[in-house]
Image (tube, rainbow, N blue to C red):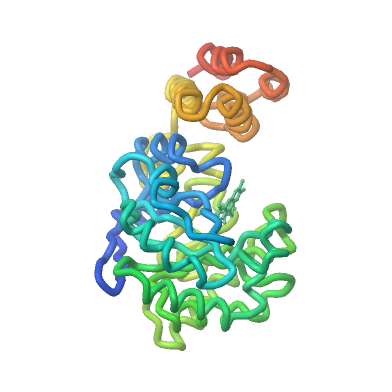
Amino acid sequence: MSDAASIALIDRPLDLRGPGTSVRFANRLLLAPMEGVTERCFRDLVIGLGGVGGACTEFVRVSSSAIPQRVIRRHLGAAQTVPVAVQLMAPDAEHLVTTIAAAEAAGAAWIDLNFGCPAPVVFDKCAGSALLRTPDRVAAIVRAAVAATRLPVSAKVRAGIDSPDRVAEIVLAAAGAGAAMVTLHARLRVQTYAMPATWRWIGEARAALDRGGHAIPLVGNGGVDAAGDAARLMRESGCDAVMIGRAALADPWIFRAALGGAPADAAEARAFACRYIDALAAEYGERTALARGKQLARWYRAGGLFVGREEERGRVLRLDSVSAVRGWFAAAIPVTGS
Ligand SMILES: Cc1cc2nc3c(=O)[nH]c(=O)nc-3n(C[C@H](O)[C@H](O)[C@H](O)COP(=O)(O)O)c2cc1C
């Protein structure tokens, strides 16, 4: 739950201005793109709980050819009630421009460019976070993307590869090339996801953008673990909005709670898990539903289903059928009562 001043800080619209169109987020909370997590089933369910101002597909990698519209449509899913971006990750502008046209035709609200992925398979192909060592290449990709679409184009970056020394240069490169918004994940590539985020770097990025005369929104990301953290990050760093990643998997109600809504009770948490598993099974089949259902169990803290009985979490992770995992969630009663 959040206090009134925190809610007022978050519960304000934010406009993302592109060359030909604008996007309005109803509030300052964005659901982070997470490959293997925020595909359309999860995203739609979380958006349906309320409190999400905007969201993004998992990254769509553009390498040896352009990505067809039908693939992007699959990532986007059905018409959305909040703006949803298509996130693209490319080593250069080749094939990116054609893919952006496909994303625009498929209904993307805006285009987000990934300059943060730490995975070696991406890094070694000079995409994702590898581009952070060459801010001029970040700028060239953003510039090409901006020229290719009427939609706003945003950039999602990390603070650096192994040092934050060039964080100002990186965000200024994106902004100077026409990015309508920059999201800074306040970790280095070498810190992957494990180390604590350093919110001070977000403040430094905001100051650099201000000094450079760039009034575009800066989104702070990294380590927002509880509803109260969102406003704290905005206050401490001066960022304009907050992006929430893994905490949304642990507690999909975190957005609603940051806006003053009640946290989920056990019945809601049970129903969400069952609906999620059902949607996954219908969309992707039982194997994916089993893997993602267990992934939810690994992270889930909504509704107190695992409070006081972590051994149950281990038991769910050892189950070997979708029906067993779903059945566990359907019957789960927290020891604290609900
Ligand atoms: C499993 C997983 C998959 C991710 N996939 C993406 C992705 O596709 N695109 C992206 O820009 N960031 C991706 N990220 C990074 C998140 O968007 C976010 O920046 C990061 O998790 C930090 O936020 P958090 O501390 O709130 O989790 C991923 C993170 C995780 C844990």
Q: Residue 198, image x and y in percent?
A: 63, 65
Residue 317 in the image: above or below residue 51? above
Relative to 179, residue 212 above or below: below
Residue drawn at (37%, 36%), measured in percent from left and top?
Answer: 49
Q: Nearer the viewer, residue 297 or 61?
A: 61
Depth order, front residue of 73/192? 73
- Identified at 72% across, 74% down, the residue is 163
Residue 213: name its quadrant.
Answer: bottom left
Quadrant in the picture for the N terminus: top left
The residue at the point 49 percent across, 77 percent down is 174
Q: Residue at x 41, y 51 (%)?
A: 55
Residue 239 in view: no
Q: Position of residue 186 (x, y in %)?
A: 60, 64
Judge from the rendering whether residue 200 lies leftward or rightward of residue 309; answer left or right.
left
Q: Residue furthest front?
A: 65
**Is residue 227 toward the left or the right of residue 309 in the image?**
left
Q: Is residue 98 visible?
A: yes
Give the percent coordinates (x, y) of residue 70: 40, 46
Quarter of the image for residue 190 reads bottom right
Q: Quadrant of residue 210?
A: bottom left
Residue 113: % across, % down: 49, 64
Q: Does 251 sit above or below residue 192?
A: above
Total marks in image: 0
